[in-house]
Amino acid sequence: MAGKSKIKTLDDIQRERASNEREENKERIADDIKDVMNRVTSRNKPKKKSPIKTALWTLLFIFLILILVNFILLNVWALKFFIKSLFLGG
């Protein structure tokens, strides 16, 4: 008995079949894991904002800028007024 016999027994066939099934199961599991990971990572992508939300944020930003500009102009006007009344007696 120098070499292996070329005759396959029923046990050899069943072992090969079980091995092939295990490999197929491993591939299916790996594909399922990849699919789940893709779904999880795709949920973290930023969603599109609605146009109403964008318009409201824009209006809020403009309103805050107007308040800031109004505050600065009021301070400039008040400074001029008090300088005139203090130094020019007006």
Image: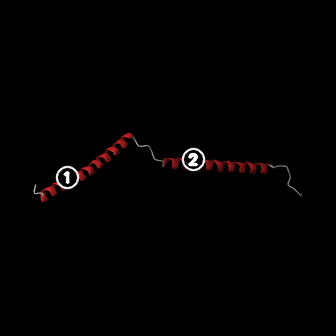
Residue 49, picture quadrant: top left
How has the structure been colored for display?
Answer: secondary structure
Q: Residues within 10 Å of mark 1 (few under 14, many from 20)?
A: few
What is the three-letter code of the residue carrying label 2? Asp
* Residue in the foreground of this view, choosing between 33 and 1: 33
Q: Residues within 10 Å of mark 2 (few under 14, many from 20)?
A: few
Residue 14 in the image: state x and y as whole percent.
Answer: 75, 49
Residue 10 in the image: state x and y as whole percent.
Answer: 79, 48
The numbered disc on residue 35 is 2
Residue sitting at x 65%, y 50%: 26
What is the three-letter code of the residue carrying label 1? Trp
Which residue in the protein does label 1 denote?
77
Q: Is residue 40 left or right of residue 26?
A: left
Q: Quadrant of the C terminus?
A: bottom left
Residue sitting at x 87%, y 56%: 3
* Residue in the foreground of this view, choosing between 59 and 17: 59
Q: Quadrant of the N terminus?
A: bottom right
